[in-house]
Image: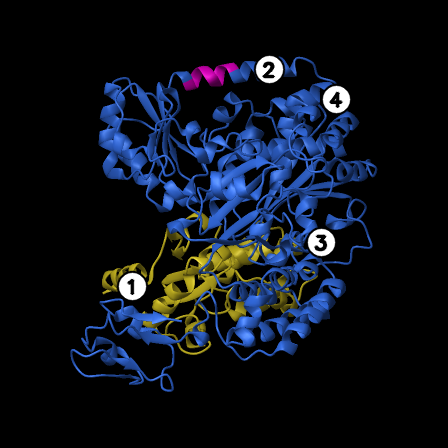
Chain colours: A yellow, B blue
Amino acid sequence: MSAETKTKIDFHQIDEILESFGYDKTNLIMILQKIQSIYKYLPQDIITYVGDKIEGLSPASVYGVITFYAQFSLEPKGKYEIKVCDGTACHVRGSMPVLEEIKKKIPLEKGRMTTKDGLFSIETVSCLGACGLAPAVVINDKVYPQMTPAAISIIIDTLLKEDE
Amino acid sequence: MITQTGLIKKIENEKKIAQENIKKQGLRVLVCTSTGCSANGALKIIEKFNELGVETGALTKEAKMSVVPTGCMGFCEKGCFVVVPDKKLAYVHVKADDVEEIFESLKNDTIVERLLYVDPALNKKVVDSSEINFYKKQTRTALMNCGHLNPESIDEAIALGAYEALVKVLEKNDPDGVITEIENSGLRGRGGGGFPTGKKWRSVSKHKGGKSYVICNGDEGDPGAFMDRSVMESDPHRLLEGMAIAAFAVGSDEAYIYVRAEYPLAVKRLQMAIDQAEEKNLLGKNILGTDFSLKIHIREGAGAFVCGESSALIASIEGERGMPRPKNIHMAECGLFKRPTLLNNVETFANVPQIIIKGADWFASMGTEKSKGTKTFALTGEVNNTGLIEVPMDTTLREIVFDIGGGIRGGKKFKAVQIGGPSGGCLTEEHLDLPMDYDALKSVGAMVGSGGLVVMNEDTCIVEVARFFMNFTKNESCGKCVPCREGTKNMLVILERIVKGQGTMEDLDKLEELAQVVQLGSLCGLGKSAPNPVLSTLKYFKDEYIAHIKDKKCPAGVCSALKTYKIKEDLCKGCTKCARNCPVGAIEGSVKNPHTINQDKCIKCGACQSGCPFKAIVTE
């Protein structure tokens, strides 16, 4: 939780977002998407704030919506967000060996999806719709087609080098 | 309703102007910039053309050509795809480095032979893209313009006839007539269920008068499917036009398109298309001077498969957890914000404009008795030509896999096709001559579903695939009803046991019993269809399940817990690499002598196999 307490929240900006969506509870998902696009995750304080400010919602109901949808994260994401597609097409063409290779190169603590230094977060997603390129890996919105363990290993090395 | 005349003339005029503008672009070089080709560097190809003085969507006098970024051409396997329609020329696997050569050859009216598609069956080069087998066997309705136009330009869409159907409908001003036309066409819901579209429209139109909504389901969550994404990204105006016709027919003035969060490009292009159409008053208030208005909103999903289910989707648009609601209240009466609601899938709407233009009879002349028209499929997996296809619904699986798909990769043997994703079932060799219609597929325990076709070869373990789907539905179960939440979880436990070689024969009975409970007792379509992959694989590949349980063997050699690694004596050179790689010291042997693996120590990690320079280590 250390990273979370460090995040500074500009509540003025949050107010502006709420205003732009008319403080309407039916816009909650869009509001959360907007906030997450700024902080890359949804900090605890924001959940309480949004829940209190919008009529008809509570922090608990906001939390309920956040935990329901896979897109929302309560944990800060890494600088490089690696998404390994494990849709059917990718799965039968070998997405799991690619994931294993990534995990070998970037070890995670148990139960976490982001590395301690905040450089990488790793997750599997169900389908990116890039089935013609299976297996696909997406790193910060860039699609890498037809991955193999060897290829992803080189890509990660390049990212590590870039970051030095 | 204010009747407007002269609307058709107006749009025809616009079309003429747009077509003339396109002519002014000279020789048009189309570059596919869909998600697939973009990942393969399509944008760099366009940049390179720009560098050479060929402008995007505008004529360069000197070169007499222009480059046009288009949506998906469907042949993802061969990307990047570059097509020059005026010369009937198609290039495959194009890289930025090839652009200069293409540019020069177009100027000199020659052909870059090495970039032509090679027909694998005839080993012959094909110049014209419509002559490529992959395309030759297709009939495109919903995908008609995908890949032929710049999806970010409404003028290009109008030049190819966009909004003509809407204008025709508005000028005729007969909403009931529109519904009758759709009814007569025999169009059925392309989202998977196959409910007659006209019937749905009719029941919503009965509640005319107050506020009602039209929703487009673009939550294509089924892993292995990308048809709807392609329509939204490649021909957004066709979808908008279809929705507008539907809204006019049922008397609605507000619509939503619910798009998956994983499709950012679709969201961008749809928004652009809505803005452009509103600017031309083809959407928005009092469309073209009539009293029909339509506001279309886009709602982005947030990553939940269950939101593809209609009532869950509505809950999500309302800003709540996307949990399905009981179906005793019909959506035609009480849907979004408790108002009458018409919900159809992307492809269903995309079929509408052509039905209006060419007539119900034309559409009904394609397909089978009860499944009319064409259907798009995403053809993926172990097949030579992966990509997006559209075929009449009487096309057989054999034609799709072997003619359009070009057969199985690497000359391997066909094993099965998984159709309809986690809600569907598998089709085997005995089903190859089955037409791809709703009823034929249902009769063998599969379903059209959203239309994902994942081809599997002899190296795919069917039990592992069943486990994969069950893991998916277990994760995506929303947890509202017990049969689905607990049932999928426990079915997964059993399947995991089987792939680890710890299953018993009683497990198979238990699995079947659980499947029936989940099928009968679940609240929504996700739960009801979740057991399909298990039931259909149990039906057609029971021997494979038994091999895992009784013989502790995975016939396809996939399930790692059941693999036995062995060193082939004749191939082993005794280099000792495997012995050094083995993390548990299970490999014994001296230098320059064949090594052996101690099966009691082996943890089946595969490190020896992947490191062996002589390919001497095999699995059984």
Residue located beneath label 3 in the image: B311
Which one is earlier in the sequence, the residue at label 2 or at label 4? 2
Q: Name the residue under label 1.
A: A153
The answer to if B493 sits in the magenta stretch is no
The three-letter amino acid code for the residue at tag 3 is Ser
Q: As rendered, which of B587 and B238 lies closer to the eye?
A: B587
* Residue for point 81% across, 39% down: B203
Is disc 1 placed on a helix, strand or loop?
helix
Where disc 4 sits, the SS reads loop
Question: Which residues are drawn in magenta?
Answer: B16-22
Pair 2/3: label in front = 3
Mark in the foreground, 3 or 1: 1
Label 2, residues with CA under 10 Å away: few <14, some 14-19, many ≥20: some
Is B19 colored magenta in this rendering?
A: yes
| Residue B270 visible here | no
Determine whether, in the image, residue B313 is placed left or right of residue B89.
right
Calculate the distance from the C-alpha at mark 3 to the C-alpha at mark 1. 43 Å
Q: What mark, if any, has residue B173 been given in the picture?
A: 4
Chain bearing tag 2 is B
Residue under disc 1 on the same chain as residue under disc 4:
no
Which mark, residue B424? Answer: none
